[in-house]
Amino acid sequence: MRTYLISQFQDGKVNPFILDCTLPQRTYCQDTWIECLISTDITTPNGQAKEEAILYPNPLSTTLQVQIPAPQKGHLALEVYNMLGQDVGGKIVEIAAPGTFEGELNLETLPKGVFVLQATLHTESGQERLFSKMIYKVR
């Protein structure tokens, strides 16, 4: 939006070097700021729409709020890995019924840096990796 506001002072031309919070939305980079989070249409192999997980705040300082769609009951494993692939934390929660799991993950003991959060749903019929997303710890 700022690029269009400043364009009135540049002969109506948009300045490509001014960044704003819509840049992630326009480039489909979803894991930056919650205010700019957009939903995308993701489909499963059978053609059904798949809900997207929401992680916020990202970057974070101590705790990460998570909203994860769970298509069936089972155990949801939230695992945090560092950039060397080492397991550095996480937790397992029970999903009693299909729906959305909402909770928080305490990452207070981790140093600042870049980590990967992986969510896997373990059910009677097997396991399904729901997602792997990068998270950024700033303090």
Image (cartoon, rainbow, N blue to C red):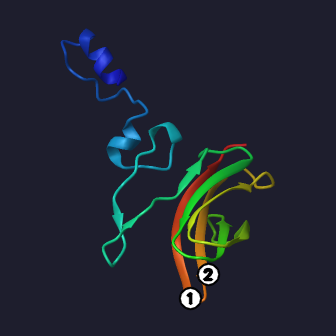
On screen, residue 74 above or below 105: below
| Tag shown at residue 21 | none
> How far from the left and from the top, in percent, is residue 85?
63, 71
Measured in 3D between alpha carbons, the distance from the residue under mark 1 to the one under mark 2, in whole angstroms, is 6 Å
Q: Quadrant of residue 60?
A: top right
Task: Specify the farthest residue to the right.
Answer: 109
On screen, residue 96 above or below 104: below
> How far from the left and from the top, in percent, is residue 2?
36, 21
> How far from the left and from the top, in percent, is residue 73?
60, 76
Q: Which residue is mark 1?
A: 126
Q: Quadrant of the N terminus?
A: top left
Q: Quadrant of the C terminus?
A: top right
Q: In the image shown, does 1 or 40 lie closer to the viewer? A: 40
Residue at (49, 37) in percent of width and height: 35
Q: Which residue is mark 2?
A: 122
Residue 1 is left or right of residue 139, and the answer is left
Task: Specify the farthest residue to the front.
Answer: 97
Mark 1 touching mark 2, by CB under 8 A? yes
Q: How many residues crowd mark 1 within 10 Å: few (<14), some (14–19), many (20+)?
A: few
Q: In the image shown, does 112 or 31 lie closer to the viewer? A: 31
**Callout 1, which amino acid?**
Gly
> How far from the left and from the top, in percent, is residue 22?
38, 35
Q: Is residue 15 visible?
A: yes
Q: Disc 2 on helix, strand or loop? A: strand
